[in-house]
Amino acid sequence: MTKKIKKILIANRGEIACRVIKTARKMGIATVAVYSDADKNALHVSMADEAVYIGASPASESYLVMDKILAAITDTGADAVHPGYGFLSENKDFALKLQGMGVTFIGPNVRAIEAMGDKIASKNLAIEAGVSCVPGHMGLIKDAEEAVKIANKVGYPVMIKASAGGGGKGMRIAYNDEEAREGFQSSKNEAKSSFGDDRIFIEKFIESPRHIEIQVLGDKHGNIIYLGERECSIQRRNQKIIEEAPSPFLDEATRKVMGEQSMALAATVDYDSAGTVEYIVDKDMNFYFLEMNTRLQVEHPVTELITGVDLVEQMIRIAGGEKLKLKQKDVKLNGWAIESRIYAEDPYRNFLPSIGRLIHYRPPTEAKTANGAIVRNDTGVYEGGEISMFYDPMIAKLCTWGEDRDVAVKAMQGGLDNFEITGVGHNIPFLSAVMQSDRFERGDISTNYIAEEYPDGFEGVQLNAGDARAIASVCTLMAQKLAERAASGSGILTHHDRAIPTDVRVQVGDRHYEITTESTNGSHLVTSTDGTDKAAIELEISTAWTPGQTLVTSLIDNETFVFAAHPIPEGYNVQYRGSNTEVRVRTPAQAKLAKLMPEKIEADTSNLLLCPMPGVIVSILVEDGDEVQAGQALAVVEAMKMENTLRAENKAVVTKINVGKGDNLAVDAIIMEFETSLY
């Protein structure tokens, strides 16, 4: 028997709430948004047909408060709830209460949520279903010392995980006893604050694995299919950053076996919605079950792009009792799709979160490109909105599709080039660097990608000679436009015959150029030399850039060239495909004087522990007068639901602690001071 759903309340926020609203609108279904203080002006609130206020900004006082969500359902007459991901999406008690109210839960049955939402129970069911599993300890662990004993028995390295976890929360890798103790406590704390459930288990950590997951879809009539796989191996702090479908690693035979095992697991709990079975896969293509997520995944768009299946629509239809129209033989994987998660975080500071107002937010146009690629951008923000410290720092999910992987990658490169964000730190430079890397192009990736490629942290990429020259040339034209504006003025300077410099000296990082320009029929002929014996190089350039724009789009010898530029004295700070470079444009006389200027000496902060991100002090682990060793944990800071342990860089003595547990800190706030003589 089917039920016609008329009004859906989305028990979530941000990007996923907007995503559900779009499909519901397409299906002619009314929507209700819920919002906290921080989300009063959020995009999902304005998109929905109705909106209900549910409390203070912390999720524990709003989105995680079941009674407030249930009251909103009653007040609005919603007859169905889509939980999105996170928050209450895998909470069996929530699903049971909806059932008792006669409200449709757009997700799987309660038994499936309970069995698969608990990672220990799901491991046992997976073993019974014949699914390949990772060795480990599936029982609950009472304290840190028991965790150490179990870790030694399983064998280091181990993964310490929250039983009710997801999204990288409550997960730590331990290589020794000390890390097992610390990891156990941090995992418990994160699990409790994120899920209200601090149960922990331990399993063997497979080194250099790939993270590959299978999308399944089941209805209430016993029909289950799988929609191929997603490669989710590029991660930081156990949270995915780049996903693609299909995987560049799997062969058809392995894909089929993984899909069949995933369906077998889903069948054990009569799975009846969209769900994801996650695996780690070693270099020999052996795969091991990690967990099953009984909800929509963040990365679902790449599956939608290669299959043509709207997963949110299928969830709604299944929840209403409809049979799956798709059979396994109907599932075809068409082309290639890539998703880049754009986060408000600073890749140059170990991906620490950033908060603030989006002064500019201008994503690339969602459309089909000239070479047949598709650009899609799922987001929950808008220009002028704020990125709050209370929630996940995701800004958007930029997705591209192409007829093959090369086309999809090139479309992603162009999409990232044209994504304009100012006001908060963001990870577009890192995403661009990955898209340019030979290793990613080969598909040679694992969950250790970031640690292996950037062992000392991401410091950007170096511009090649051609890109540096192109940037120098375009910045010259930008400087000329500024000079033209100053010369024309607003009537004040019009009587001056001010010359616009056509002969300049440009410094791009450590490179130096002598550049001359000549206007030619709406474009410019830019001639540059770099001080070597090589002949001068000419580039024909046109640009529509005007002062004040941060995204600079130019045509160089009929090829599009795009970079971001922010004004600095005598030039610009330029970001281009993972590089971050200062560009100075000077007259010959200014260039001579610049060589005489002394270098600015950076302030010495080696005797201070600075807060690397906006956050809350969870704990201070030392006291005044303590002697600490290099690598010793000093403090724990929570930001955007993640705990970050700050460690001593060298041997030192703590002379002053400036903060306490519960204090809210800004970036670079001084947490503690040290005696410098031991550094």
Image (cartoon, helix red, strand yellow):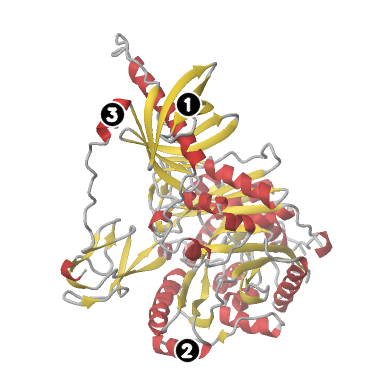
Instruction: Looking at the image, tell me whether mark 2 or mark 1 is earlier in sequence order.
Output: 2
Count residues near mark 2 (Cα–Cα under 10 Å), then give few for <14, some for 14-19, many for 20+. Answer: some
What is the CA distance from the residue labelled 3 to the residue labelled 2? 65 Å
Q: Amino acid at mark 2?
A: Asn
Count residues near mark 3 (Cα–Cα under 10 Å), then give few for <14, some for 14-19, many for 20+. Answer: few
Locate the C terminus and report the quarter of the image it occupies: bottom left
- Residue 75 seen by the camera: yes
As helix, strand or loop, the secondary structure at mark 2 comes to helix
Q: Which mark is residue 527?
A: 1
As helix, strand or loop, the secondary structure at mark 3 comes to helix
Looking at the image, which residue is at 74% across and 76% down?
264
Q: Quadrant of residue 194?
A: bottom left
> Residue 499's x, y, as percent?
34, 15
Vertical order, 251 against 463 (above or below)? below
As helix, strand or loop, the secondary structure at mark 1 comes to strand
Vertical order, 322 against 357 (above or below)? below
Looking at the image, which residue is at 43% across and 34% down?
530
User: What residue is disc 3 on?
Assistant: 590
Instruction: Looking at the image, tell me whether mark 3 or mark 2 is earlier in sequence order.
Output: 2
Q: Which mark is residue 124?
A: none
Q: Amino acid at mark 1?
A: Thr
User: Viewed as shown, does residue 479 lie left or right of 293?
Assistant: left
> Residue 148's x, y, as percent?
43, 87
- Residue 142 seen by the camera: no
User: What residue is disc 2 on?
Assistant: 152
Instruction: Looking at the image, tell me whether mark 3 or mark 1 is earlier in sequence order.
Output: 1
Vertical order, 350 against 23 (above or below)? below
